[in-house]
Image (spheres, rainbow, N blue to C red):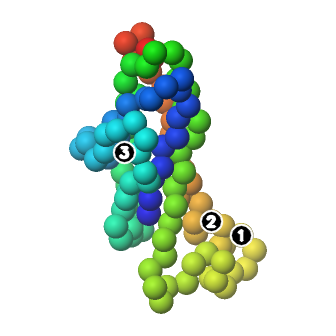
Amino acid sequence: MWFDFQDDANGPAMEIVYFNGRRVAMGDDLEPIVLFDAAKAGDKVLVAVILLQTVDEKHFTGADLRIDFSAGRPGPSEVPHRGEVKNQRYRGVSSMVITRSTSTLCNR
């Protein structure tokens, strides 16, 4: 499972990405980062992203999660289902809570 944070800024915006309090990436044009190498039911991670000061305004434009299914395992489109069972099974993958700091220091 991969995590890709997206922002928009006038000029480079240095990003620092943390998973469960541990810094996993830092840079101004980050590629997708491995969130879970082999995700299992019930796995959780807290993601935090810091955007350092820029010359102008910056904006959070989204975060993408991508799942690469193991060879020999069915993907969501291949799982036999009835009604909404398929959608419920994978619904937790897209659950994200987004908060923004109100601190003047963090919003520069």
The kind of residue tagged 3 is Leu
Q: Quadrant of the N terminus?
A: bottom left
Q: Secondary structure at mark 3?
A: loop
Q: Could you classify mark 3 by the number of other residues whose Cα lies within 10 Å: few (under 14), some (14-19), or many (20 or more)?
A: few
What residue is at 41 percent from the left and 45 percent from the top? 30
Question: Mark 3 or 1, which is nearer the eye?
Answer: 3
Q: Please report whichever mark, 2 or 3, sits nearer to the chain's N-terminal start.
A: 3
The kind of residue tagged 2 is Gln
Q: Is residue 38 left or right of residue 74?
A: left
Residue 35 appears in the picture as rendered: yes
What residue is at 31 percent from the left and 40 percent from the top? 26
Q: Could you classify mark 1 by the number of other residues whose Cα lies within 10 Å: few (under 14), some (14-19), or many (20 or more)?
A: few
**Residue highlighted by disc 1:** 84
What residue is at 46 percent from the left and 85 percent from the top? 71
Q: Gap in Å between the C-alphas at discs 3 and 1? A: 28 Å
Judging depth in this view, the residue of 32 and 43 nearest the camera is 32
- Check the image and name the residue furthest to the top: 104
Give yes or no for contact between labels 2 and 3 (Cβ–Cβ under 8 Å). no
Task: State the image quarter where residue 94 is shown.
Answer: bottom right
Task: State the image quarter where residue 38 is shown.
Answer: bottom left
Give yes or no for contact between labels 1 and 2 (Cβ–Cβ under 8 Å). yes
Q: Is residue 75 left or right of residue 84?
A: left
Q: Gap in Å between the C-alphas at discs 1 and 2? A: 6 Å
Determine which of the numbered discs, if any, sits on residue 88 in the image. Answer: 2
Determine which of the numbered discs, if any, sits on residue 46 in the image. Answer: 3
Give x and y (percent) for residue 20.
Answer: 29, 45
Q: Could you classify mark 2 by the number of other residues whose Cα lies within 10 Å: few (under 14), some (14-19), or many (20 or more)?
A: few
Q: Please report whichever mark, 3 or 1, sits nearer to the chain's N-terminal start.
A: 3
Q: Secondary structure at mark 2?
A: helix
In this view, 82 is above or below 51: below
- Check the image and name the residue furthest to the left: 22
Judging depth in this view, the residue of 95 and 22 nearest the camera is 22
